[in-house]
């Protein structure tokens, strides 16, 4: 997917539908697809992120629902008279999987939308907001990189945070934040002066990226909208329903619900298939050299 409209529509549909469906089958498909795609893009870094963030998030959601949500009929334990039910456990696991899947989709979106693709889409109707969004998103990795530089510099002169107590660690963190804020203010002034010197905001500055629409991208856009409309209809009509309370009940229609699940699976795994296809094609071309 290279067209920014297709990228935006794909991610909007996958993320919104994953949260709105509240169906563990759809949640599992979305999570697995997002995980595989993140592994393709980031390799071992994605595995560390999944084990270090997503897995604890699922456990935390499940534990929170177990002890604070007492709905359901299948109680297997009582604590201070409050029932601990299987339904609340299943609901918490599903919520954790949805949350982790959405985070993984945003994790890949940050990589796929690089190069100003999404910004170019809104540069004409909303130029100021697009510029502000781009600069804000750029600040996040810059802050992280600059914080690492400051920490390395402090460690090199013997003033690092390792081996210090809690109070000194907090003081050390506040010092880094103070330096980062000072740097961001100075960088903001320099950026504003540079933009003014380059004539930003003037009537002459009208350069924008123009991109021709390819037939395959237009067909994918139409197919994506049709599939999204079909999946939304299946949820609204109750054909792909799933209930957690008062007891777990699967109410998926044997025809329409299963088809909608298959369509959603194809949509979610499309980036995985496309990446694997391009990788295989590239290896085949290299082998012929």
Image (cartoon, rainbow, N blue to C red):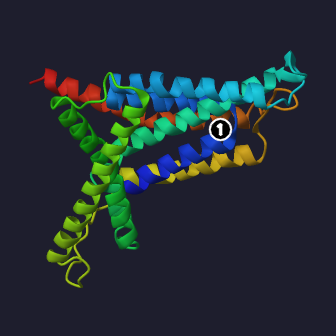
Q: Which of the pair 142/199 is nearer the observer?
A: 142
Residue, far top: 76
Q: Secondary structure at mark 1?
A: helix
Where does the image place residue 11, in percent across and percent down from the top left? Answer: 48, 47
Query: Horizontally, is 260 left or right of 181 in the view?
Result: right
Where does the image place residue 187, in percent across and percent down from the top left? Answer: 23, 60
Query: Horizontally, is 170 left or right of 263 in the view?
Result: left
Quarter of the figure that contains the N terminus: top left
Q: Which of the pair 32/226 is nearer the observer?
A: 32
Work out whether 191 lies above or below 284: below
Work out whether 96 lies above or below 138: above
- Quickly name the residue at label 1: 260
Residue at left offset 39%, top offset 26%:
165
Query: Horizontally, is 211 left or right of 257 in the view?
Result: left
Where does the image place residue 135, in percent across and percent down from the top left? Answer: 32, 59
* Quarter of the rendering containing residue 133: bottom left
Answer yes or no: is residue 204 visible: yes
Crowd band around label 1 with a 10 angstrom C-alpha radius: few (<14), some (14–19), many (20+): many
Where does the image place residue 213, in percent across and percent down from the top left? Answer: 34, 60
């Amino acid at each position: 997917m290279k067209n920014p409209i297709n990228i935006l529509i794909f991610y909007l549909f996958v993320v919104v539908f994953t949260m709105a469906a509240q169906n563990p089958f759809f949640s599992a498909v979305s999570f697995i697809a997002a995980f595989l795609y993140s592994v393709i893009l980031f390799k071992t870094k994605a595995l560390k992120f999944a084990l270090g963030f997503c897995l604890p998030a699922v456990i935390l959601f499940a534990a929170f629902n177990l002890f604070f949500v007492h709905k359901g009929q299948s109680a297997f334990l009582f604590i201070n008279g409050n029932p601990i039910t299987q339904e609340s456990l299943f609901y918490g696991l599903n919520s954790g999987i949805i949350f982790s899947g959405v985070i993984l989709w945003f994790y890949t979106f940050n990589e796929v939308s690089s190069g100003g693709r999404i910004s170019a889409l809104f540069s004409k109707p909303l130029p100021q907001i697009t510029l502000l969004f781009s600069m804000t998103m750029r600040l996040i990795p810059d802050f992280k990189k600059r914080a690492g530089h400051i920490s390395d510099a402090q460690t090199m002169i013997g003033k690092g945070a390792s081996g210090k107590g809690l109070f000194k660690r907090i003081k050390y963190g506040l010092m880094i934040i103070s330096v980062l804020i000072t740097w961001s203010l100075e960088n903001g002034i320099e950026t504003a002066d540079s933009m003014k010197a380059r004539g930003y905001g003037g009537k002459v500055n009208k350069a924008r990226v123009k991109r021709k629409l390819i037939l395959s991208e237009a067909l994918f856009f139409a197919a994506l909208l049709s599939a999204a409309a079909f999946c939304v209809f299946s949820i609204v009509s109750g054909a792909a329903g799933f209930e957690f309370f008062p007891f777990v009940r699967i109410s998926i229609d044997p025809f329409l619900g299963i088809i909608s699940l298959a369509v959603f699976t194809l949509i979610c795994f499309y980036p995985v298939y496309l990446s694997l296809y391009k990788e295989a094609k590239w290896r085949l071309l290299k082998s012929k050299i």
